Image (cartoon, grey):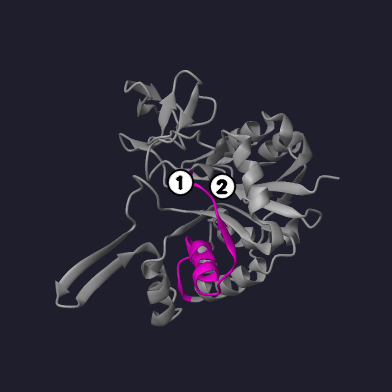
Amino acid sequence: MKKNVIVSLADANYYPLLDELVDSIKKFKESENVAICILDAGLTSDQRQKLSNKVDEIKSAEWDIEVPGFKVRGKEWLKSQVSRAFLPKYFPNYEKYLWIDCDAWVNDWNCIELYFKACEDGKLGITQTIGPGYKITSKVNWLVGKLAIIKSQNFKHAVKSKIGYDKARKLAFAPHINIGVFSLEKNSKGWMSWQNNLSKTLKAGNIFGSEGLAINMSVYIDDLETEFLPLNCNWITSNLLPKFDETNNTFVEPFLPNYKIGIMHLAAGIWKDGADMRVNKDIKINVQTLNNKNILKSLRYNN
């Protein structure tokens, strides 16, 4: 019986990305001891059948927390903003859960092992979106004296979700946590904290981003014990492009010591001429090599 599981979710539009994620996992021999489970948020019957030959379980995603119908009509993929906080409900037979967004893929198995190690003793294993070269996600426009306008992803979402200005201020300049890749044990108290916060953020805020705000609340307000992993465990390409190591034929961090990218995450997309690489895998962009050459590369798996 497999004790650890990797979970992801997709609809029909993102099926090609999900299929690539699964293939990127299964290319490692170590994956034979890890289950792969999928939440279906609008796959076609043909897509679901093809996936069933590759993964251990497929379940239909639900609205685990009630949300107004007008907010989600025709947007089944938004279930990912809710259902990922309830993974033990969908797949109860595992001890450790690692979620990976379907627009990410695995480049180095060592990061998978780190996530399963990070969540021991009830801790949350996750990365922050802050590090050398990463785009700044918080800004301040000073008006006069001590008066300023705060612009931060956490603060904006917190205010819109009406969780209170005291909590919003606590989150304003906390390093943002990206929920696209995380790990938790089955019996971690983190699930309940996250679910409770998600119930609050969904009442008034947007569906999209609600789960991210909720997990930031769990960490920075509820003091959920967290193991912060290095950036290469969830490399967000829209924040900073990687470099390419031609000698070893792999993507690496752009700054010394150029650690190998563990999980490549195309969150927010990589855009060229108005088209998103997540939708069109033929798109290639200029990527710098370790030898300071510029080459045309896709950031998609095996492309």
Q: Quadrant of the N terminus?
A: top right
**Mark 2 lies on residue:** 101
Quarter residue 14 falls in: top right
Q: In the rendered image of this protein, does residue 15 appear above or below residue 226?
A: above
Q: Could you say where residue 156 lies in the image, as x and y percent from the top left?
A: 36, 68
Q: In the rendered image of this protein, does residue 160 appear above or below residue 267?
A: below
Q: Residue furthest left?
A: 144
**Mark 1 lies on residue:** 267
Contact, mark 1 vs mark 2 (Cβ under 8 Å): yes
Q: Rounded to the nearest whole Å, what is the CA distance between mark 1 and mark 2?
A: 9 Å
Whichever of callouts 1 and 2 sits on the residue coming sooner in the sequence is 2
Quarter residue 171 falls in: bottom left
The boundaries of the magenta stretch are: 204-231
Q: Residue furthest top?
A: 247
* Residue 276 - label: none
Q: Amino acid at mark 1?
A: Ala
Residue 42 appears anywhere in the view: no
**Left or right: 123 as drawn, with respect to 88:** left
Which residue occupies 53% across, 61% down? 73
- Label 1 SS: loop
